[in-house]
Structures are given as structure tokens and as C-alpha cells.
Amino acid sequence: MAITMYFMNSQQLNSFIEYMRTGRWKPLKLQTWNEDPQSTVGRQEVVMSNVILATIPVTAMEESDDPITFDSDFTFDGVENLSSFQLPANYR
């Protein structure tokens, strides 16, 4: 899977530095949802656990007025379904 994230704090960098020093990785969870307001199926929300990012931002080398973002692939080995899509209205 892939994700685009804002580079607004140093939490992941500090976790990576701790991993480099100690060999211990702090578990990371991602909670996300998919929803289309134009649809009648509602929203699906999941939590992925034990996420490992393939890319950890260290610094930004370009100047810009836009927020800094970075892309990363990731893996995970646990998932919890908090809410599911409904059947489309014409199928109910």
C-alpha cells in the first residue's frame, strides 16, 4: 500500500533514530476511512496495526509555500474493521 503524509513533526524520524540505536521499533497504527458523499454506501473505517513505513522523512531540501508532503509505501500485519460499507440503496 502507499500513503501520502504531511511532514509536520519529527515523531517518525525520532522513532527511526531510536530503532537505529537500539534495534527496537515502536508499533505504529494508522486509522483511516473511505467515504463518498455522493454514494449511499456510507463509510468504512479501519485501523491497521504494526505499520512499517518504507520511507522516513529526514529533511526537506526544497523551499515552498505549500505544506511539505512525502510519499511512502508501507506494510502492516493487523487490521480492525471499525465500520463497514452498507449495501447501495437500490440493493436494500
Image (spheres, grey):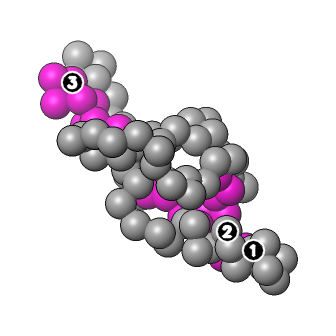
Q: Residue furthest top?
A: 90
Q: Nearer the viewer, mark 2 or mark 3?
A: 2
Q: Quadrant of residue 17?
A: bottom right
Earlier in the chain: of badge 2 and badge 3, it is 2
- Residue 82 spot, x, y in % from top left: 42, 57
Q: CA distance from mark 1 to mark 3?
A: 43 Å
User: Magenta region: which residues?
Assistant: 25-53
Hey, what amino acid is under mark 2? Phe
Q: Which mark is residue 19?
A: 1
- Residue 67 spot, x, y in % from top left: 28, 46
Name which residue lies at 64% across and 48% down. 55
Hey, what amino acid is under mark 1? Tyr
74 to the left or right of 88: right
Disc 2, SS: helix
Name which residue lies at 61% across and 62% down. 49
Pointer 2 residue: 16
Pointer 3 residue: 39
- Residue 19 spot, x, y in % from top left: 75, 74
